Amino acid sequence: MTDLARAAVLTGFGKPLEVQEFSILDPEPGGLVVAVEAATVCGTDVHNWQGHTSSLKPPVVPGHEGVGRIIAFGDHAEADSRGTPLALGDRVVWGHANCGKCYACTMLQDETLCADRFIGMLTPCTRPPYLHGTFADHAHIHPRAGRIRVPDAVGSELASAASCALRSVIAAFDRLGALDYRDTVLIQGAGPLGLFATAIASMHAPRRLIVIGAPDARLELAREFGADATISIEAHPNPAERTAIVHELTNGRGADVLDGPVQSLGFLVRTLATQPELPRLAAGDVITSQVFSNRLQFSEARFQFHELRECQRGRRLHFLRRVRHERAPFRLRRRDRSQMARRWNTTVS
């Protein structure tokens, strides 16, 4: 493999990224070196660049969404987190690395609370092996980091986005619980999280699926992903006006399930939502989407909820592989949604 890699380095908050060269070191035991094939930009990357993350100390290589082709193996790294054999040239996605030993990892089984968690995009690039983030042409995958082989049917761009936004949305829907044909779902925001949430909600065949957001191109994509109605915040900048439209679309009931931002994190709320854009949180359960414990599995045209914890990256890529469409991979025909609605009670366990 080549001796040097280029990376975009954050040297100071709000400053342009600087392209620098780094030596490509051999992988550690259990680790991998990959040639980055695709890297997508998450909103967290923007917040980090702006200086909103107190634990980040430049210089760092930003980025945590990416797909890489394996160019070197560390010892005992020849399989992914689900036991699938890996070979040179295989594409993988990967995540942060928890310690696996602390109370949060062993008893709570929630790696997001790990006190010794390794997060590449927050790790200074002065620390070997230097290439911790995905904004580079090569990257090191930490020995403890989960990694999943990307199926051949899944494009690198989709897989990269799935490594964060779709992961978060699937985890949120899993914690929310089952939707059915009686539910009206309101998605607030048409960014990556909102569009993925629209796609997942559409597959549950709710009674009505409404998306609020902008610009129009994203709302058009939301309709392709299965939204029954969209409301533009550019055409309707007044929240009261948007609330009135939601009530009109729902015969005065409002939404049963609401998705939107809370302190920059996605959440799902099941509520009676008399004020759809400002739900009374006491009316339902608040679900943060930044919980990486996905138990949602897709199997053809039906859903089954499993309590067994498995590597969620494999599940979300399974979703992308199963549900394909020429332009909108997640869209179901209305006939399919109706069929799913009729048999929903027998397909969820």
Image (spheres, rainbow, N blue to C red):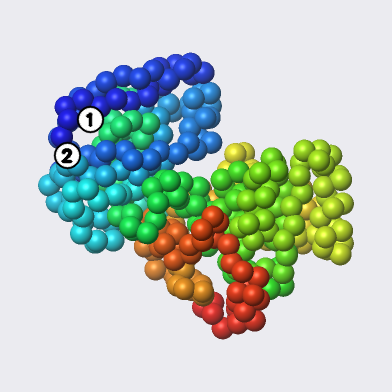
Q: Residue furthest left?
A: 75
> Circle 2 — which element?
loop
Q: Is residue 61 left or right of residue 194?
A: left
Label 2 is placed on what type of residue? Glu
Q: Is residue 320 left or right of residue 30?
A: right
Q: Position of residue 212 (x, y in %)?
A: 72, 48
If the image is split into quadrants, where does the N terminus sit? top left
Looking at marks 1 and 2 on the same chain, the residue that comes earlier in the sequence is marked by 2
Res. 258 image quadrant = bottom right
3 and 283: which is toward the camera = 3
Q: Relative to 346, say whether 32 is above or below.
A: above
> What's the CA distance linking mark 1 and mark 2?
9 Å
238 and 120: which is toward the camera = 238
Contact between marks 1 and 2 (CB within 8 A): the answer is: yes
Label 1 is placed on what type of residue? Pro
Q: Residue furthest front?
A: 326
Q: Position of residue 245 (x, y in %)?
A: 84, 53
Q: Residue at x 40, y 30 (%)?
A: 62
Instruction: Identify residue for label 2.
Output: 28
Residue 239 visible somewhere in the drawing: yes
Instruction: Identify residue for label 1.
Output: 129
